[in-house]
Structures are given as C-alpha cells and as structure tokens.
Image (cartoon, coloured by chain):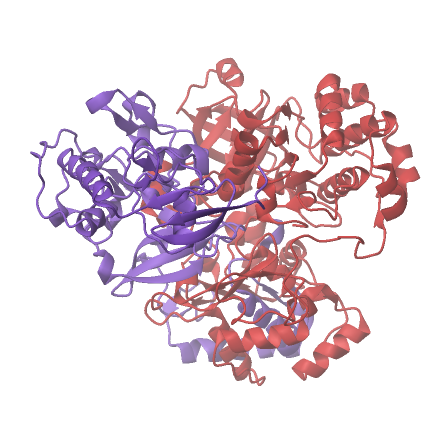
Chain colours: A red, B purple
Amino acid sequence: MTNSIEEFEFTDLILATGTNTTENHPIIGMKIKRAVRQHGTKLIVIDPREIDLVKYADIWLRQKPGTDVAVFNGLMNVIISEGLYAKVYVAERTENFEALKNTVEKYTPEYVEKISGVPAEDLQRAARLYAKAKRANIAYAMGLTQHISGTDNVKTMANLAMLCGNIGIEGGGVNPLRGQNNVQGACDMGGLPNVFPAYQQVANEEARKKFETAWKATLSPKPGLTLMEIMQAAGSGAIKALYIMGENPLVSDPDLHHVRAELQKLDLMIVQDIFLTETAQMADVVLPSASFAEKDGTFTNTERRVQRIRKAVPAPGQAKADWEIISELASRMGYPMEYSSAQQIFEEITSLTPSYGGITYRRIEREGLQWPCPTSDHRGTKFLHKDRFTRGRGLFHAVEYIPPAENTCEEYPFILSTGRVLYHYHTGTMTRRAKGPAQRYPECLVEINPFDGAKLGISDGQAVKLKSRRGMVEAKAKLTTKSAAGTVFMNFHFAEAAVNQLTNPALDPIGKIPEYKVCAVKLEKA
Amino acid sequence: MDRRILINLKIDGKDIAARAGQTILDVARENDIYIPTLCYLAGTTKAGACRVCLVEVEGARSLVASCCMPVSPGMVVKTNTEKVRAAQKMIVELLWSSGDHNCLTCEQNGNCELQNLIYWLKIDKPRFAIEAPRYNQENTNIMIQRDLNKCVLCGRCIRACNEIQVNEVLDFSLRGSHAKVGPAFDEDYINSACVFCGECLQVCPTGAITYTQGKFAGRPWEMEKVRTTCAYCGVGCQMDLFVKDGKIIKVAGNSDYGKPNEGSLCVKGRFGMDFIAHPDRLTKPLIRRAKGEELQEASWDEAYSFIAEKLAAIKSASGADSIAGLSSARCTNEENYLFQKFIRAVIGTNNVDHCARL
C-alpha cells in the first residue's frame, strides 16, 4: 500500500474495486464502514458482485467481469473532458499526460457502457464524485489483478489517482490489500525470481556483487522462472527438483489437472508444511514445520509495517521452524548457515536491505515500523511518494482495454469468478480445521443469481455441476443476488470441490498472474 | 470546539488543566484519579447508562455521570464522597440482584468488572433478593456462548457491534425489566446476520458473553498471555494468545499500542486458531524412498541426507537451473530471506517465487 490502514478511516472518499473487503480484510472493511457511517466519507464501489460494501456505498458500478480498464478509462475521460483533473499536480509531478488524454478520449461514457454494462450516467456521477474529493483513497485486491489485464488494471488505477493528485498525500493513494499475512514480506525478502531483498535486481551487477560479498557465493545473473513458469518447466522436464515451503499449489493453482501432471514428472519434490496438504501427499520428502505460534520472527503487513510474532507454544513432535530446517539443509550441502535465533537472521537482513535498515527487534517490540525505515533514527514511512515519485515524475501509462482471454459461448454461457469467503482462508488447510469457521461455513457453495437458478430449475442448496473447457466440479448452489445474472462465484477453499479444476491458466504477460476472475463455464443440475 | 483552549478545574482537591471537550472521566484518567465505570467503552457513543461513574460536582443539582459530563472552567469535582459511594453501592447491588452472578461456575471469575466493582466498593452481602435465572444459555454455536442471566445491560456489546465493527447486528429489544440484548427477531447468533468477529465477547464486562471453547479450559490467572501478529490476511492484527500448559485456549485482540487493529479482530483471527493443536499436524519427516512407494516416517538426519544427496546429484547432472523453490507468503521474513538465500547461494539459481499472484 502507498498509504496506511489507519488512513481509511480519515479520508474524503474511498474507491473500492476488486476487493470484497469485509470478507477478505475484515478489519480494513470495518474501518471503511466506520468512515462512511461516522466520518462522512463517500464510498464508490466498482465490482461485478453485490458485496457487503455495496450497502454502504454512495455509488456502485457493476461492470461485467474483466472490463475494468474500460471503466477506469471512462472515469478519466469524464474527468478530463469536464476539466476536473488536478492541473497543477499533473503539470508539476507527472509526465506523459498527453498520451493518456489521447487514449482515453474514445472511452466516452456511452462507449464504456457498451463494453462494461455500466450506465453512462452512473459513470459520470462516479467520475465527478472522485474528482471533486479533496483526498481520495483507492483500495483494490485480487479482483483487479487476477486478469490477463491485471497489470493494465493497476496502471489505470494509478493513472486515475495521479490525474486527481491523490498520490503522495495522507488519506489518498493506490492501496493493494494483500491477501496473505506476509506476502509483502515474502516479496521484500526477495522471494521473487528477478530480485534480491528490497527489489535489488539480480541482473544488476552492483547489486549482485553486494550479495556475492555478503553471502560469499557466486550468484547467477539470469532472472529465474515465475511460479507458473516453474510448473510448466516441471512438465517439460526442464525443472527436475522443486522445494516447496508452506504452499499448496495443488489446490491454489489454476487448471489443476495440468499442475498434477507437471508435478508428477519431477525427480525430486520436497514439501515443508504444517499439514500433509494435497501437494505434500505427492512429495518425495515431507518436512514438518512449526506454525506461526511456535516460533519467533517478523511479518510485514499490507501497509509495510514490520511486526513481531512470538513463540507461544512448543511445536508438535519433531516439527521445527522453517528457518532451522533451511539452515541445517544448507549446512549439509556444504554451505554453513549457523544462526542461533530468528533475530540473528533479521540483523543480516537489515544489513542488506536498505528499506529495513533502521528496524531492530528492540524498536518493534511494542509497535511495528513501516518501511522505508533506512536508519535507526528514522520513524518509518506512513505514506509513499510524498513530494516525489521513486522515479522522479509519475508516469502515466496509456492503456487500452482488452477483453478477457476466455469468452462465454453457447456451450459455456456463464462467467465464473473465484475468491474467498469470510470464514475460510486460501486452500482451507487452517480454517477448515478450526471448529467455529467450519461450523459456520461447512461446505463449498456456488453463488448463482436467482434469475439463472429459476431458468435452469436450480433451487437453493441443490447440488450443481460446473464444467469448463478444463474440468468439472460439483458443489451446492446458493441463490443470491450477490452474483449478477450470467455470472457465478465459487470459493477455492474446498479441495473436494476444487474450483481450480475449472479456472483458466491464461496469464497476465507482465505480472504472470492467472485469470481467476473470468472463465467460461456451463452450469447444470447434478 | 478549539481543543487547544485549557480549562482549569479541581478534582479531589487537585488543580488540573484540561482541554476543552474532555469529560470529567477523561481528565480524571489522565491524572491517575480512579473513577469506576461499567458501561463506558472508549471510542463509542457515551451512553451514561449505568451511572457507576457518578461524581459530585459543586453546584450541580444531583450527582453527575463523569463519562458524559464535559469539564467547564472552575468546576470542583469530588470522586470519593460518602454520597458518591452510597449511590455507586446502590447501583452495583441492584445490578447484582438482577442476574445470576454466580462466580463459582463463571468463566470470567477473576476477570469480571462487576465482581471487581463489588470488591472495590467493599460490598459484603447483597442487600436485595437475587432474581432467579430466567434465560436459557445460548449454546447453538461453538464460538460464542451467551448467558443473558449474567447481562447487566451496559450496552457495550451493542456499541461494539454497531460503532466499532459496524456489523449492525445487536441491539436492545423489549422494555423495562424485560429488556435484553440480541440480534433481530431474538434469534441466536448462528441464525442471525452475525459474522462472529467476537467484538461483543471482548468488551463484555461480565460472564454474559464468553468463549464457548474456553469453557473449563483454564482460569484467567492460569493463562499466560503472548502477544503476536495474526497469521491470516495481510492486515497483521495484533493479538494475544492465552496459553495454558502449552496449549492456546483463546485469542483476543491486543489494543496496548493500537495499530493496525486497535484491539479488534475478525472471525478467523479470534476463532480460527484450532489448527495449531490439530491432530493432523505433521510431527515427523516423511520420505518416499522410491517412486510409487508410500511416504514413510524418517529421522531428520535421514531426511536431510536424502535431500542433500539428491539435490547435489541433480545439480551436477542437469545444472542449478533445473532446480526451483517456492518460498511462502505464510512464513516469516527471516524464513523467506533464508529460503531465497538457499536457492540463490547454495543451489545457484534464481528460480524462486511464491504465491503472491494467487
């Protein structure tokens, strides 16, 4: 996030898009609801689903899934043509405005209505409301990124925020709500194929030299493969060994039939986890690890706040913390890693990661610090890009709308989107073993619009079959207007009704993120 | 109101400078003067319902509720007069008599604000006849248990539900001595729009709303509190794990320092931690010694040697780029750092990624 969680409560307008906040980030959802109910904040929701936040919204734009770029370009079309944009900000802090202006020119409200189904008048109202807010905050999540146009979607949002001078101010910003406890930290720590910690490029010689010296090793200058590419390479035989720590790709990845076949070709698969997950069951070696309550360390949350976790209970049996396992394995392979505590590793991290440079366990004992925090007297950074962008001026990226990779047709007439529900989390390995959440949401439900239900003779609670070009699953129907007619929604928490049998592995060309939010399916009674 | 304007007043004989807009209670707390409260809940509407926080203000017609009364210049406040104590005792004794406050079997024993008030006010016997219990316990869900016989109608749960979490599920229903708290149509939580954030449970001053699974699992003084960060979504809520005999009994939001959740949690954080002690947890390394065989238990030593030998063989036969690793958005920074260091420095490839995109 460019800005902080606390700022959601104290801003003039929130634009929430592609985020079912009250279910996936309930505490941020709570702050958005408080802002609306108690502090007079305006709320625009742009989402194909009638999520809970719609109840609190001033304007709800229900676009067809996958038409986000058109909607955002349409908002900017109105803002520019009505002269509502932040002219001084655009002139002083940004570049490439003319290109943006030329691109969005054809996205008139009427044209956008044809693509997205959003009424022209609503689009205009939303554009004016956003542009006239003194401070406006954009919140988004996977609803925007899990498309083949995911990167474009994020760029158009950044365009909109810059156009109205909302980046680099308190209460503003473009704020991705990160779905996993430490996805921010995993990225910061270099858990990515092209960068070392703090996004220092592996292809950059200076950065590589720095890490070669620190780690006393020769490092490869060639960026590695991304997750989806690794899976494909496993299938083709180019990847022979895969070491998986705390992930369950056999439920979370798209087009599971394929993933299983690819993983089966590996010579060696190592899985380190707290449960014998679907993925671990296929492994050659399974290593038992400690859960977050059984070890010390840090997580970095969605607002870049580095916070402590502390050991509360012993790990079961012989399970060990992941850092202990990795250290021992490295030592066995002739590269001694001798750490006596997580804190000692953290000290090595901060010596090599400039944005974490000023953070110590002592400083975050009470309250976490938000990076960038480069020095021991730096108080952390509440919001980014104040006065200047990382690259100097903010660059507008003119982006054209492209339709989703898979369209509905006579055989597969419904659009399927996937996501989470409040009571469960990701592949369900944790929440489905928690009695309360499992009682409240015991089985997988497919959300179907009552109109479609009536048309197909499907009633609430009835078993239905969903088929796509890649697979078939069965689950119970839940009739709800949350889904628009012609669309269905299914969660991916239940391995026995694994929606990723159906999903389309088409990737965003830059982000390499699969298009989970749009695939074509057929729906029938089971 | 200009909050920079200072207002001078006296509380219990002490000269105090307060800011405009503060209540007597705010000012007393800032100056370490104790005034008991019950219905007061920071961050929500001032209800002034229970009258436990009464104080004497010179010149006022009657005792005033300090939680609602703003300070004014020259105010003279007394918090500990006989009149104040007599009124507080009367209120607390009436609350006591109106419910089934039997500490012997109550989970909140030792952590109950009503019990503390009775003790602090030195009330050794209830003056009034205690009413018989009239409500059934609500046991229809396995997260939150409700016993309205222990409810003192302070309304904190209602304000927490409506003003803190904004879930808008709880309210008072009925009137007078029949008044009670609950979701619409007097439904149980499980049949209502409740989303089980448990904010009501966390703010309840008595044993009216408690953790179902915490029942008979440990007394407040037997549990150690360990502060940590929630392991579910990216918000990073600060929470306290209550631990007894190496087991987590319950989870509460931590509000000691505020950010990012100010003591609030959602259903996953508060009620989603059973997985930690689940019998399905992996406790020993497992090895599939040959393709097609079952996974079998092994020692750590064997597992490390097995992996080290195989990885070394694959690396020398097919090169470092034939090996890849998936790091984890669920593990700590320290572990993610070490994992990519392992893949880059020990294996020698940049084939490392994680599920940030999924």
Image height of B97 relative to B35, above or below: above
Q: Is residue B348 left or right of residue B329?
A: right
Which one is in front, A373 or A272?
A: A373
Which one is in front, B64 or B339?
A: B64
Image height of A181 relative to B288, above or below: above
**Which part of the image, by quadrant, shows the C terminus of chain A?**
top left
Residue A183, percent from left and from top: 58, 56
Image height of A385 relative to B200, above or below: below
Q: Is residue A180 left or right of residue B88?
A: right
Does the rendering let one see residue B254? no
Quarter residue A517 falls in:
top right
Residue A245, percent from left and from top: 52, 63
Residue B203, percent from left and from top: 34, 43
Residue A484, percent from left and from top: 58, 22
Which one is in front, B187 or B294?
A: B187
Which one is in front, A400 or A519?
A: A400
Q: Is residue B100 left or right of residue A251?
A: left
Q: How many marks?
A: 0
Does the rendering let one see residue B330? yes
